[in-house]
Image: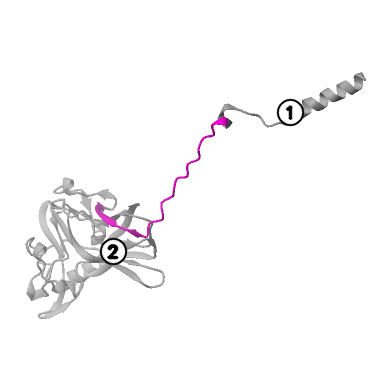
Amino acid sequence: MKTQNLLLTALLISAFAFLPSCSKDDDNPTPVVTVPTSPAATSANLTFDFTHNFDGANVSSANFNQFDFITLNDDTLNLTKLRYLISDIRLFKSNGDSVLIDGYQLVDVTNNTGLTYSPTDDIPTGSYTGISFTFGFDSLDNTGNYADLNSTSWNWPAMIGGGYHFMQMEGKYKDMGSEIGYAYHMGTASPSSGVFEQNYFRADLGAINITGDATIEIKMNIAEWYKNPYTWDLNAMHSMLMPNYTAQKSMYQNGHSVFSLGTVVQ
């Protein structure tokens, strides 16, 4: 009998051990709130920030007039003016299609204007195999009449092709103890009187993935204008470069390696 009682007690203890526990929280369970997830963006607005360096050393109007820069040809120079024109930003898809952001921007480092460009048109989000822009104007746009550019002394003389400058870079360089001015101006090339040759180029920045509104840094390495592939000798070419066909085509060749894609924030 004593053995049966002990067995019964053990069975009761085991049964209570497997009963579900009960607490104050179970009486008032915390409601579960489902936060809806935002749908993935299908379009995005892009902002472009233009920054400048000389082989990695930051350049801004704050260090203009200082002989801080040495070219591949060992010319020591400063900057007193830097302005340039970009247009027609285009993004390329893997299937060969592209998205054009029509418009232009005059970047003026001298006066700290135009350093940020915010086109109004949105683009589709997605992965793009490349992003590029036209340095200057192509042959169609360069025939336009733009009041804002006309008011900034940006026209290119008709006798050497007309239209607009693509860039004005000016300053001084040192030579045998003297400071000599230079004017590195780029636009339409003229191989002979009355004959004109388009001189704009497409600056390719590489692939980019756009997931939403984005701020894209475009970097200009000014040193590249003086070294790749043509090593620029300022003693040989420092002024009267606008009608100089060789100078214009050398600028064209060197310009292709000047720009690169920087930080992308989105």
Q: Is residue 38 magenta?
A: yes
What mark, if any, has residue 192 been given in the picture? none
Up the image or down, 12 lies above or below 97; here it is: above
Query: Which of label 1 and label 2 is nearer to you?
Result: 1
| Badge 2 density bin: few <14, some 14–19, many ≥20, Cα 10 Å | some
Q: Quadrant of residue 237?
A: bottom left
Q: Position of residue 93 (x, y in %)?
A: 38, 68
Q: Residue at x 10, y 53 (%)?
A: 179
Q: Quadrant of residue 145?
A: bottom left
Q: Position of residue 69 (x, y in %)?
A: 21, 51
Q: Which segment is the magenta one?
A: 27-53
Q: Is residue 183 visible?
A: yes
Tag 2: amino acid: Asn
Tag 1: amino acid: Ala
Q: Residue at x 11, y 63 (%)?
A: 149
Residue of label 1 = 17
Residue of label 2 = 228
Q: Is residue 219 visible?
A: no
